Image: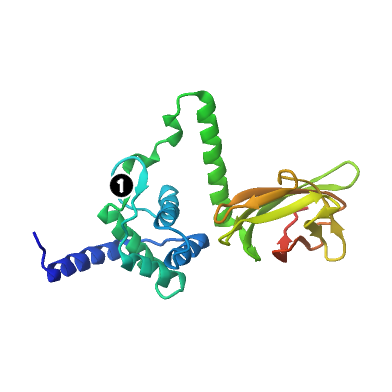
Amino acid sequence: MNIPRYVTIILCVTLMSGVISQINAEQFVIPNWIKNNAKWWYQDQISDSEFIKGIQYLIQNKIMMFPSTNTNVTGENKIPSWVKNDAGWWANGTISDNEFVSGIQYLVSLGIIVVNSASDSNPCDKYTTAAEKETCQEQLDYDKKIKNYMETATPTVVGPVTFYYANSESQKTDDGKTILTIHFVVQNNANQEVTMSCQRPNSCNYSLSDGQNEISYSTNTLVYGSLTLIPNTPKLLDWTFYGFIDPSKNYSFLVKENWGSGSIPIKILS
């Protein structure tokens, strides 16, 4: 049966009006990397499925809240062109967060993105062995820690990488020196891999500075002296420094890579 065009338009307008009313009732804080994804999707630099994965992340982590239906979040690739246009306009600042989210809500209403009601259950329950469950839970805890850091940390952009400085911990030693550990989340915002390099203390692209002197690291969580950052995949990264550190001075974490350099202020508690 052919539905008259004017009827289709009326239905869409009615549906979208209800969606926008629901969305405007809530405030959404959407991570910047989703805006990058929207821009790349609009420019055909990433596929529909890759963009949907980013939206799934927001829904699964309750950054976007939509009515539920069953157990996981799944997605298809049949997305109306106007939703893609909205993503591009949102990335360029032409439309608001709420207007962008209303387009995503429309995809949920069509069943292109399916939100399921059992999402609050522990996804690790599907595994049978204790080792599998433990590995799964560790990954969940890791992802939650990253999410919390990114929501509360101070971001600094250095080249294509955003450093989210979460916090630092300091401990005095018997010899008067300080063990200082700095916690970061790092995220590559480029569309290609970026490598962080630190082979050894005297050959490292990262250090701690008080404005006059630099302190080399003692340990870090780079494996084999480097870390390859996959686009839009945040990673936890810790650096530990050992030396005479004066809390009354202003310290900065220095980045001196060939892809970018910068200085990140570090707060040191006495």
Decide if residue 50 is on the left or right side of residue 111. Answer: right
Q: Identify which residue, 237 or 79, lies in the foreground.
A: 79
Please identify the residue farthest to the right as the structure is shown. Answer: 175
Q: Position of residue 20 (x, y in %)?
A: 30, 65
Question: Looking at the image, which residue is at 30% across and 63% down?
Answer: 80
Q: Which residue is mark 1?
A: 68
Residue 159 seen in the current view: yes
Q: Identify which residue, 67 or 204, lies in the foreground.
A: 204
Q: Position of residue 55 (x, y in %)?
A: 41, 55
Please identify the residue farthest to the top as the structure is shown. Answer: 129
Decide if residue 166 is on the left or right side of residue 111. Answer: right
**How many numbered discs sit on the rendered protein?**
1
Decide: is 132 above or below 269. above
Decide if residue 270 is on the left or right side of residue 111. Answer: right
Question: Looking at the image, which residue is at 62% across and 64% down?
Answer: 160
Q: Identify which residue, 265 or 197, lies in the foreground.
A: 197
Please identify the residue farthest to the left as the structure is shown. Answer: 1
Residue 52, quarter of picture: bottom left
Mark 1 Cα shell of 10 Å, populated few (<14), some (14-19), many (≥20): some
Question: Looking at the image, which residue is at 62% across and 61% down?
Answer: 162
Residue 25 seen in the current view: no
Residue 172, quarter of picture: top right
Question: Looking at the image, which residue is at 55% across and 61% down?
Answer: 191
Q: Position of residue 169 (x, y in %)?
A: 73, 48
Residue 141, quarter of picture: top right
Q: Position of residue 44 (x, y in %)?
A: 44, 65
- Report the amino acid beneath label 1: Ser
